[in-house]
Image (spheres, rainbow, N blue to C red):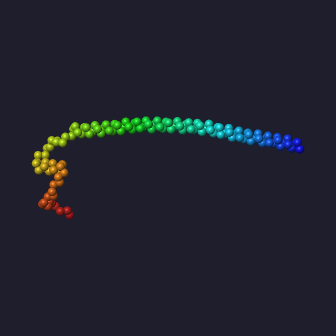
Amino acid sequence: MLNYLKLGGAALIVAALLYGGWAANGWRIRAAEAAVLKHELRAELQRRVRADADRLSLQVKLSEAEAKVGTGVKLVTRTIREYIHDTPDCRITSPAVINGLRDLRAGIVPAAPTQPAVGRAAP
């Protein structure tokens, strides 16, 4: 019976060694996966930092472009105020036409003509 106890004890020791090796191998595999994940995480963080830097540089460029557009609009309005006058020289000499244009600019719509237009009728 002592032989069976020795054989059973040896079997338990072998089983414990097998289980220990199995567990140690799993730890080794998980450690390798953790190292790979660590490198992937570092690469992802670097990619996000680059993306943020690119986004900020594009925001600066956009702000500069918006400032240029705003400056251009101010320049155009200033130029219009400088070169466009309210009283340009008019070559129309007929007082009736001048009065009619002045009334239209003021928003006064002329009354409809009282006499019907004489012309050729449409076929």
Q: Return the residue found at the far bottom.
A: 123
Q: Quadrant of the N terminus?
A: top right
User: Percent from the top left, x then y, of residue 81?
Assistant: 23, 39
Q: Can residue 13 be seen in this view?
A: yes
Residue 90, picture quadrant: top left
Residue visible at 29% across and 38% down in the picture: 74
* Residue displayed at 50% across by 38% down: 48
* Front position in the image: 23 or 63: 23
Q: In this view, does 43 lie to the left or right of 119?
A: right
- Residue visible at 40% across and 36% down in the picture: 60
Q: Where is residue 107 in the image (x, y as percent from the top left)?
A: 19, 51
The percent coordinates of residue 23 (x first, y second) are: 71, 41
Q: Residue at x 15, y 48 (%)?
A: 102
Left or right of 76: which side holds 35?
Answer: right
User: Looking at the rendering, which quadrant does residue 43 occupy?
Assistant: top right
Using the image as rendered, state which of residue 11 and residue 53 is in the foreground: 11
| In front of the other: 1 or 35 | 1
Query: Left of 67 or right of it: where is 86?
Result: left
